[in-house]
Amino acid sequence: MREVVEKRLRQFWADALRKAGEGTERTSFANGAERLADRLEKLGYLGQKDGAYNPKSIAAWPRGARLPAAEVMFAVAIDLDMSLDEYVHGRKLEAVTLESRLADLAALVTDLRERLEQAEENQDVLIEHARRDPAFRDAVRKRGPEAERIAG
């Protein structure tokens, strides 16, 4: 398990450095590390001795060297719009939006309405069938006027 976690952490930091370095003349870990150091400082995250993170230290994170606190990882993921699901689960998870959940519920309600309407139609057919049955009429008469009123 430990090896899997370490591998995924290294992959996260490699991808983060690549993404942080995007848009520079030459995308590299070094450019990404410099830009990430600046971003972290602007976000209020400081390295050891309360100074800005050293770009050389950041460039070593994909090798698993002296990794920062988990909150720094979360801040970087949020800042760079990276999903941690891919690194935690080893695959991207499908985002479930409120709209899709509401659409599923609306479909369920529609299905339930249709089933209820069908049950009511079946009930009406069964009642009409029963009213025509002489045994049903006799049973209702034996129960008295209240049963006759309900049976219609």
Image: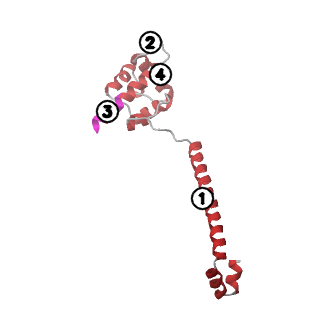
Q: Amino acid at mark 1?
A: Arg
**Residue neighbourhood size for the residue with mark 1, other residues' Cα within 10 Å, grouped as few (<14), some (14–19), many (≥20):** few
State the image coordinates of residue 50 (x, y, percent, origin top left): 42, 28
Q: Secondary structure at mark 4?
A: helix
Mark 3–mark 4 CB contact (< 8 Å): no
The colour scheme of the drawn protein is secondary structure
Mark 3–mark 2 CB contact (< 8 Å): no
Measured in 3D between alpha carbons, the distance from the residue under mark 3 to the one under mark 2, in whole angstroms, is: 28 Å
Q: Secondary structure at mark 1?
A: helix
**Residue neighbourhood size for the residue with mark 3, other residues' Cα within 10 Å, grouped as few (<14), some (14–19), many (≥20):** some
Q: Amino acid at mark 4?
A: Asp
Residue at screen point 57% across, 47% down: 104
Mark 2–mark 4 CB contact (< 8 Å): no
Measured in 3D between alpha carbons, the distance from the residue under mark 3 to the one under mark 4, in whole angstroms, is: 25 Å
Q: Amino acid at mark 3?
A: Glu
Question: Which residue is label 1 attached to?
Answer: 115
Q: Is residue 129 above or below residue 104?
A: below
Residue at screen point 39% across, 18% down: 29
Q: Secondary structure at mark 3?
A: helix
138 to the left or right of 93: right
Question: Which residue is label 4 attached to?
Answer: 38
Question: Which residue is label 3 attached to?
Answer: 6
Q: Earlier in the sequence, mark 3 or mark 4?
A: 3
Q: Where does the magenta region start and end?
A: 1-10
Q: Earlier in the sequence, mark 1 or mark 4?
A: 4
Q: Is residue 26 above or below residue 116?
A: above
Measured in 3D between alpha carbons, the distance from the residue under mark 2 to the one under mark 4, in whole angstroms, is: 17 Å
Q: Earlier in the sequence, mark 1 or mark 3?
A: 3
